[in-house]
Amino acid sequence: MSDTRASGFLPQSGIETTVLGADEIILNMGPQHPSTHGVLRVKLKLDGEKVVESECIIGYLHRGVEKIAEHRSYQQFAPYVDRMDYVAAVSNGLGYCEAVEKLMGVEAPPRARVIRTILTELQRIASHLLWLGTHALDIGALTPVFYCFREREEILKIFEKYCGARLTTHAFRIGGLQYEAYDGMEQDVRRFCDDFATKIEEYEQLLTENRIWVGRTRGVGILTAEDAIAIGATGPVIRASGVKWDIRKAMPYAAYDQYQFEIPTGKNGDTYDRYLVRMEEMRQSRRICLQAIENIPAGPIMARIGKVLKPPPGEVYHAIEAPKGELGYYIVSDGTTQPYRVRIRPPSFINLQAFDRMVRGHLVADVVAIIGTLDIVLGEVDR
Amino acid sequence: MANDPEEKQPPVPPAGETPAAKPPSATPPAQGTGDAPARPAAPAAASPPKPPAPPAAAGPPKPPVPPKEAPPKPEPLDNDLVKRYRARFGDSIREATTDRKQAILVVARERLVEIAQYSRDDEQFNFLTDLTAVDWPKREKRFDVVLNLYSFLKNERLRLKVHAAESEPVSSVTGVWPVANWLEREAFDMFGIVFEGHPGLKRILLPDEWQGHPLRKDYDILTQDTAWVRENLGIESGQ
């Protein structure tokens, strides 16, 4: 066996061989990968286990929502926005209804605004719970997802009692609300909020000081404040980088100017800080709900608007603080019953652009942590 | 809706007062638009008694109609901000308006990057919230490229607009705000606007082989659909 050439293991001279480079390979992840949270495809250029470069390929869920809007009346388009960020449909609807109201120069009555605030904050908690459960699951913590879904279920039950739907709720109407608060809604919300305080402690006990959790998240996917601003990140992502900015405070809408709450921020802009920020946001949302439920003003729930909406010509940009970040609607009216143009500024789409910056230099295993921490919903990325 | 007792409906006399012989009107009642034409049958049948417009007898007293506010509309804007821009860029600031209390500057296409740089560094509009486009096919320069800026320091928004014809490229602002990268790709994908100096201008949401730019007003989805059906399924139409 001394002659290796004869044994056939080494190529004989004269035969062309392909040398496999030992330095970089391209790895394709998704679009059917369980931890890309939908149909996200990521092309990773790897040096060993390290990510050198990445490219997100999106559009698998593109439905042309903005084009659909141009062929629907203002009210007809309202249910479509629920299908963008389908885990936070209430927030999408709030942004759209308020944008059209602003375009028309009407305002929802105080009672409607307070009920909107309560439901939107519950939706924020539900969205963050879904994020927490799946994010922890991606990293390898199997337990939290069950707890998170347990509490999320309570919120969805409130939605179901309120408007009959759990996910794509279409809870609000342009000009106010279609449905009155159901009997016992206050008690339901209060009971949920009372229970939820201890539930957050439970999650934190599972994760916050867990060595594996800290090891997998601290220092992973760092985004500095300058980078976050340059790349247009919003929501918990920019707050975890230390920018204390929340549209609920900066440009209050709905009834947020009436309530006390804090804007949590992080220091390092890593995955762990984003985790802490979102946990604190859930506490603050609970706080807002409790304040709002104390005093729901009486009165009408619908502004005086006609059945056919014809906003005067012009344009408006209105943004709200959705669970994922700044959700903006830029609507142009030409004075007819159908919007001339509806542009949706999706927080997930723009936050996802930060992915490449965050992932470089990290291991493949951290890629799923970084996708999770961005909290994207592909329905909104692709629209 | 309970507070709105059909105030927009044309005043219909209560059923009891109308002559019973009156046949049902052939035209359906107007769908609550408020400006329904006077019904042709009503004057002839109801003219002899002609009660002087009795208020709806059975209905609750109508709440006083609030004075109608003037509908919001775009107005020219001339505040300090605009003055500073005008002093710096002169005629390149084509228009300054405010619409729904939001400031809008229409700027010259050639100087967009310069103005963007100035907005970011001197005017503190350091956050590009959104970049998009609007198509006005009847206009000579059909596209509006719209940049929504935000200033953390001033807590203010500003909208910059550029008019561009179909053949005119717009300079890319990716050098000023990196976030514009994907946003410009999306505008290119949906409108076919070419951004000069963009690091990798290609489609983002639609497949690379897609024909046309769907958010243009003259884009017809049926043409493409029919072509696909004809080519791939071998039938005339899938509709």
Image (cartoon, rainbow, N blue to C red):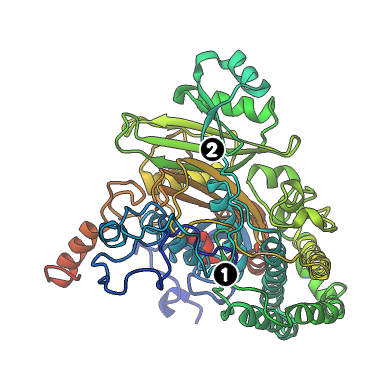
Q: Position of residue B173 (x, y in %)?
A: 53, 34
- Please report the residue visible at 61 percent of the width from the left and 27 percent of the height from the top: B117
> Which residue was labeled with disc 1?
A178
Read off the chain for label 2: B
Pointer 1 chain: A
Q: Secondary structure at mark 1?
A: loop
How far apart in space, not on screen, are marks 2 and 1 (Cα)? 34 Å
- Which kind of residue does numbered mark 1 sit on? Gln
Say which of A188 and B29 sits in front: B29
Question: Mark 2 packing: few (<14 Cα in 10 Å), some, or many (20+)?
Answer: many
* The N terminus of chain B - image quarter: bottom right
Using the rendered view, name the quadrant where residue A117 is placed. Answer: bottom right
Residue A82 visible within the image: yes
Contact (Cβ within 8 Å) of mark 2 with mark 1: no
Q: Which mark is residue B5?
A: none
Q: Quadrant location of the C terminus of chain B?
A: bottom left
Given residues A41 and B140, the one toward you in this image is B140
Disc 2, SS: strand
Q: Which residue is mark 2?
A: B147
Residue placed at 61% from the left, 67% from the top? Answer: A90
- Amino acid at pointer 2: Leu
Residue at the spot x=33%, y=46% of the render?
B216
Residue in front for this viewpoint, A32 or A191: A191
